[in-house]
Amino acid sequence: MCRYADTYATWKSDPVAFWEDAAKGIDWITPAEQVFNPDAGALGL
């Protein structure tokens, strides 16, 4: 499987864990309390 397909499968199976892991790569002043809101829609608007 290609890297994109692996990444997509990981996100699809557990989007909260996927974005929590992605947020670890950011230098936060204050760590995020919530990294994903499935009710916010695709763009979070």
Image (cartoon, helix red, strand yellow):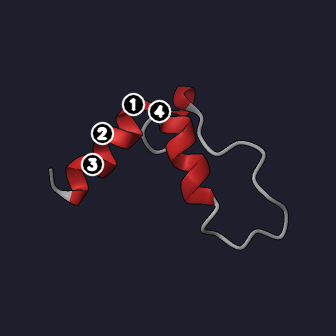
Find residue 13 and name its label: 1
Quadrant showing the C terminus: top right
Please tell me how crowded label 3 is: few (under 14), some (14-19), or many (20+) other residues with Cα within 10 Å: few
Q: Nearer the viewer, residue 33 or 13?
A: 13
Residue 25, percent from left and from top: 60, 68
Q: Residue at point 23% right, 58% down?
A: 3
Regarding residue 42, the answer to whether it shows in the image is: yes
Which label number is shown at residue 9?
Answer: 2
Tag 1 near tag 2, CB within 8 Å: yes
Which amino acid, by three-letter code, is at mark 2? Answer: Ala
Horizontal side, residue 42 vs residue 26: left or right: left
Q: Earlier in the sequence, mark 4 or mark 3?
A: 3
**Residue 41: % across, % down:** 47, 33
Q: Which tag, 4 or 2, sits closer to the chain's start?
A: 2
- Name the secondary structure under disc 1: helix
Tell me the residue that label 4 is attached to. Answer: 14
Give the farthest residue toward the bottom. Answer: 27
| Residue 6 - label | 3
Residue 45 seen by the camera: no
- Residue 16 rendering spot, x and y as whole percentages: 56, 37
Disc 1 and disc 3: Cα gap in Å?
11 Å
In this view, the residue farthest toward the top is: 39
Quarter of the figure with residue 42 = top left
Residue at 64%, 69% (x, y): give it.
26
* Amino acid tagged 1: Ser
Q: CA distance from mark 4 to mark 3?
A: 13 Å
Going by the numbered disc 3, the residue's amino acid type is Asp
Q: Residue furthest front?
A: 1
C-alpha distance separating marks 4 and 2: 9 Å
